[in-house]
Amino acid sequence: MNLFKHIISISVIGIFLSFYSCDRIEQPIPIKVGGLDWDLFPAGDSADYTWPTWTQNTNTLQNILLEDYTGHTCTNCPAAAIIAKGLEDANPGRVFIASIHASIGNSFQAVSPPEFTVDYTTEEGDKYANEIPSFFGNPSGTINRQGGGLGNTIWFLSSAWTNTINSSLSNTPKANLQVQTNYYAQTRGLFVHTESEYLTTLTDEYALVIYLVRKSVVSPQKLANGSTEEEYHHHNVLSDVINGTWGTTISTAPTTGEKVYNDFAIQLPDNTNDTTYNTNNLSLITYIYNKSNYEILQAIETKL
């Protein structure tokens, strides 16, 4: 079941010439505010809302999203998770992990009391495993959903993650991202603002996706020796996709310098009985991808 009250986003496109020299950008958000749920804003009036001010994005580095497909009864998955966490730790701010509890049939993700009582599956994760071609099982991973994996698919064995990521970090990025948020504890309202910028002219259609991940969730996990670790730390668990499985379409055949702005307002789950949804345990992973082949152009992580 989807955890969020999803709100339609506002989107506006601005084309900026490559020779644009100022380091500040005029406020790109349109005056109209339809589509955002202003009940989530304690002041109640959009006229009082503080919209983001965007500065020129000077990033020149390609970031990597490693989607680790896992399961709490998958005995080979903890070893893969160690590889993933090691790559994230070795490349801070460049490599981001999304642990996606999904497979075809969900054999390793099933709730099985009395030990495995937490359901980490999501509707979106299930769709990715079932609808992106050639998924082969757990553990497996995608690396910016680029090709070259097992059988020349986008799916990589964990033994290939390190070399593939290390070589991919030197790629020239085709897009950049910036994200700003405003959070209001009174309403659990989270307002998310994004700037997507294309660094080269492209063909095809592109979409923006925003994952909500829980940084750490402690619950049982089957290990390779057949035992169960009762207090296993599941890392960066995909908990929902705030703008739908396949995201928000933002561009078709974008040109160099094109910038697209999107805005979302969502209500986070109640954390009264589940403290894993405290904001200090949450972050957003935002990425742009090619809708024709799923390849991710750029990704960033934003802590709440």
Image (spheres, rainbow, N blue to C red):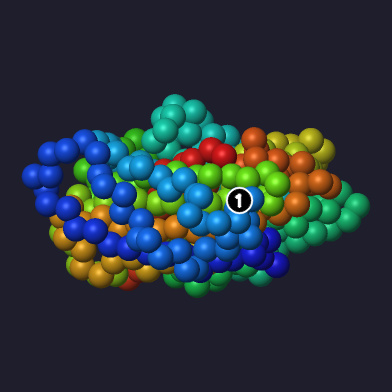
Q: Residues within 10 Å of mark 1 (few under 14, many from 20)?
A: few
Residue 12, image quadrant:
bottom left
Q: Residue furthest left?
A: 19
User: Camera-side residue: 56 or 209?
Assistant: 56
x and y percentages locating residue 259 in the rendered image = 26, 55
x and y percentages locating residue 246 in the rendered image = 46, 67
Residue at 61%, 42% (x, y): give it.
Answer: 282
In the displayed structure, does residue 123 sit left or right of residue 8? right
x and y percentages locating residue 299 in the rendered image = 39, 47
User: Camera-side residue: 175 or 145?
Assistant: 175
Q: Residue furthest right?
A: 114
Q: Judge whether residue 77 can be spotted in this image.
A: no
Image quadrant containing the N terminus? bottom right
Residue at 76%, 61% (x, y): give it.
Answer: 110
Q: Residue furthest top?
A: 90
Image quadrant containing the C terminus? top right
Going by the numbered disc 1, the residue's amino acid type is Ala
The number of callouts visible is 1
User: Camera-side residue: 146 or 94?
Assistant: 94
Residue at 47%, 68% (x, y): give it.
Answer: 34
x and y percentages locating residue 105 in the rendered image = 66, 69
The residue beneath circle 1 is 43
SS at badge 1: loop
